[in-house]
Structures are given as C-alpha cells and as structure tokens.
Amino acid sequence: MPTSKRKIWVDLMLYPGHTLPTAAAPVIVAAGLALHDHVFAALPLLLGFLASWLIHVGGVFTDHYLLLARHGDVREHPELNDALADGTLKLSALRAAIILCMVLAMLPGPYLLHVAGWPVAVIGGIGMAASLSYAAGPLTLARRGLADPVFIAMFGVFAVAAAYYVQAAARAGGAAAALTVLGALPESAYLVGLPVGTLVTSVLVIDDIRDREFDEAKGWRTGAVRFGRGWSRAEVCILTGFAYLAPLWFWLGLGYRWWVLLPLATAPHAIGILRTVATAQPREALEPMTPKQAALGLVYSILLAIGLALS
C-alpha cells in the first residue's frame, strides 16, 4: 500500500516532533532572558521564530532532496525512495518546497527590518547559509565533519542572541537604535543558550549513531562514521552532562537566582534517554530517541526561560 502524501510530507520530511522543538528552544530561552532584562517584545519574537523554523525546515527538505537525488541507492528512508519510485513524491515538488520555505521565511523581513534594523538581514542570511550548508553547498558541514560545533554555535549562541536582539531593538526604538543595541548586548545573551545548543546537537548525534552506515555510504564524516558509535555515545553523554551543569554555573557564576536550577527537574528523563542511547543496538530502537531528546530540550528550555525571568 503506497504511503500517503500526508505521511510523506509531514511525518517523514517536515518531522514536526523534531524541527519545532529544536527551533523553538533557543527562542524560548531568549524570551526568558528578555523578560529578566525588561526588553520582552512578543511580536518580533514570534515572527523571528516563524522565520527561523521555516529556514530550519528548508534545510531538512534540502537534506532529503539531496539524499534522493544523489544517493538513490541509499535506502535511509525507504518510504521516501518508494514514494519517489511510484510518483507519490517528485523531486520537483521537493525543490519547490525548499524555495517556498525560504520565501515564506523572508515575509516577516520588512517588519523585522523596521523594528530591528539592518542586522536582521545579516541574521537571516547567516541562518539560511547554515541551514542549507548542512547537506548542500561548497562547505557541506556533514561531509566535512563540522556539523556538531556549528549546531552548538547556531542553536546555543547565535539563535538566542539574535532572538534577544530583535526584542531589545524593538523596545529601544527600532532601526535607528540597531547599532547601539547590537553593541550593548549583555554577555548573558551569548551564554545562557549554550546548554540548549548542546541538547539540540545531541539530537543530531543520536541521529548520527542510528544512521552510521547510511552516512558512510553518502560520504559524510560524522563522528560515528570517523570514530565509531562508541565515540558518539560518549559525545551525547558529554553534551547532555554540560546542559545539566550549566544551570549551576548560571546560579553561582553569573549571579542569577536559584530559579535557574529549574531545568534540573528534567534530569531523570535525560538519564533514561542516555541509557537507551548507550545500550540500544538495533537501529529501530534509536528512532524514538531523537524526538524524545528534542522534547527534552524544549521542556528544559521552558524551565530555563522561567528561571531566567524570575531571577
């Protein structure tokens, strides 16, 4: 029985259980920090999130497109291979979806340029380049083994600082205040998102463990391909461990109140995921772990945002 178009586009490619939490997590932390600093601005934050999520989805679609177009013999997602073979899915439609995501991501641009100035265009350009470069372009992060540090930087530093910036600029007077606000971003805007970056990156690394044979066939140099699954399992433990040490740093080192320890309440769930990642052997056993880790990152981010707002 052919796979339905809804399952192909939503469950297998849009993958909302993966893309929505990872795109939302840094924005939520930026909202909490903005509330703490009295610069919260709901509409710029919401539109910035929608743009970043669409850019993220465009990158995921690009990954699928290149897998099917260049590596048709690699059955990493057999339902997509079968859908392409029976005509349910067409490469032309996938190309159009990538373009549509990027065009829709630019629609909030005029408003964001008005309230936050020219840095918004730079932020959007960097976001698009990073998203598309994961699987495409001359850099191709996955092929060069650079995806993990770039993910930490983009989701843990860049996305949080950018989301904080558009709020602060909007509250400070719009485009005319862009340079002043950009030069005066607090150090915390670059630091409080780091545990979110490591949790989002751990989602990617769990995928790398699961898909090692497929990534090797594609010529990707992920940690699991270069150094083995044991290396990547240890990496997930280190990334997750950092996320649960960071609130102590925020409390004792950055001077936030004990409320920033709220994310530690999710530690039992994190330990459960780590146990499965450390011991699971069949590929199928790891498939539920990426949406679970993404959901963990989302809940962690909500609790961290609450802690920052109350500090």
Image: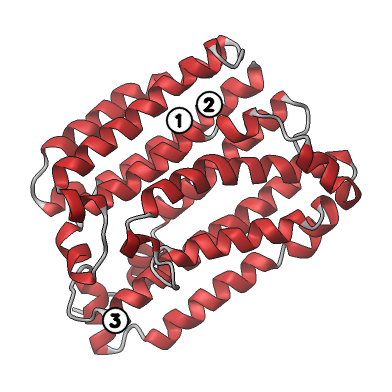
Check the image and report above or below for 16 versus 64. above
- Residue on which disc 1 sits: 300
Who's the residue at 66% across and 56% down the image?
A: 123
Is residue 254 placed above or below 48 in the rendered structure?
above
Q: Which residue is depicted at the point 18% across and 73% down?
A: 75
Farthest left residue? 281
| Residues at discs 3 and 2 in contact (Cβ within 8 Å) | no
Horizontal arrangement in the rendering, residue 266 relative to residue 302 (left or right): left
Q: For residue 304, which numbered disc appears in the image?
A: 2
Number of numbered markers: 3
CB of mark 1 within 8 Å of CB of mark 2? Answer: yes
**Quick one: 122 or 9, which is closer to the camera?**
122
Is 176 drawn above or below residue 8 in the view shown? above
- Under circle 2, the secondary element is helix
Instruction: Determine the CA span between mark 1 and mark 2.
Output: 6 Å
Looking at the image, is mark 3 or mark 1 earlier in the sequence? 3
Where residue 42 sits: x, y (%)? Answer: 73, 42
Residue 84 placed where, x, y %?
28, 84
Q: Quadrant of residue 300?
A: top left
Residue 284 pos. (x, y %):
14, 53
At numbered mark 3, what does the secondary structure look like: helix, strand or loop? helix
- Residues at badges 3 and 1 in contact (C-beta under 8 Å)? no
